[in-house]
Amino acid sequence: MIPDSATIRNAAREVASQLLGRPISEGQRLVTSGLIDSLSVLKLIGLLEKKLGIKIPPDSLQPEDFDDVDLIVATVERF
């Protein structure tokens, strides 16, 4: 079962902040700004899967799917 949007949003903020070592702001670009790279996107996915108890299939994902919190929520809700 997919968690609700608010739960996903909180988890996305938490894991992105954990990866960056500092809080992120609303709408802050992660990938296109260069704050995280493709390896960090994989770490972000793994942390989200663990935190939310879900599995995100990697075969149709692009790094841009994880560029900000809104995109992360939309991506997780697709699966």
Image (spheres, helix red, strand yellow):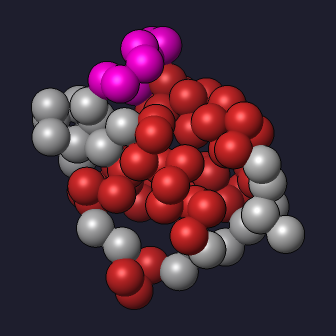
**Residue at 15% over, 40% down:** 32
**Does 22 lie within the magenta span?**
yes
Picture coordinates of residue 27 (x, y %)?
35, 25
Horizontal arrangement in the rendering, residue 70 relative to residue 31 (left or right)? right
Instruction: State the residue in front, 35 or 61.
Output: 61
Q: Position of residue 21 (x, y in %)?
A: 45, 19
Labels in figure, total: 0
Q: Nearer the viewer, residue 42 or 72?
A: 72
The answer to whether residue 43 shows anywhere in this view is: yes
Q: Quadrant of the N terminus?
A: bottom right
Residue at the spot 14% in from the left edge and 31% down from the top edge = 33
Is residue 44 at least partly visible in the picture? no
Magenta residues span 20-28
Is residue 17 positioned above or below 44 on the image?
Answer: above
The x and y percentages for residue 18 are 53, 28
Question: Which residue corresponds to the image point at 37% horizontal and 37% vertical from the top-left?
Answer: 68
Q: Position of residue 36 (x, y in %)?
A: 27, 39
Q: Look at the magenta stretch and give its main secondary structure.
A: loop
Give the left or right position of residue 31, taking residue 16 as reference. left
Which residue is found at the position 50% from the left and 24% from the top? 17
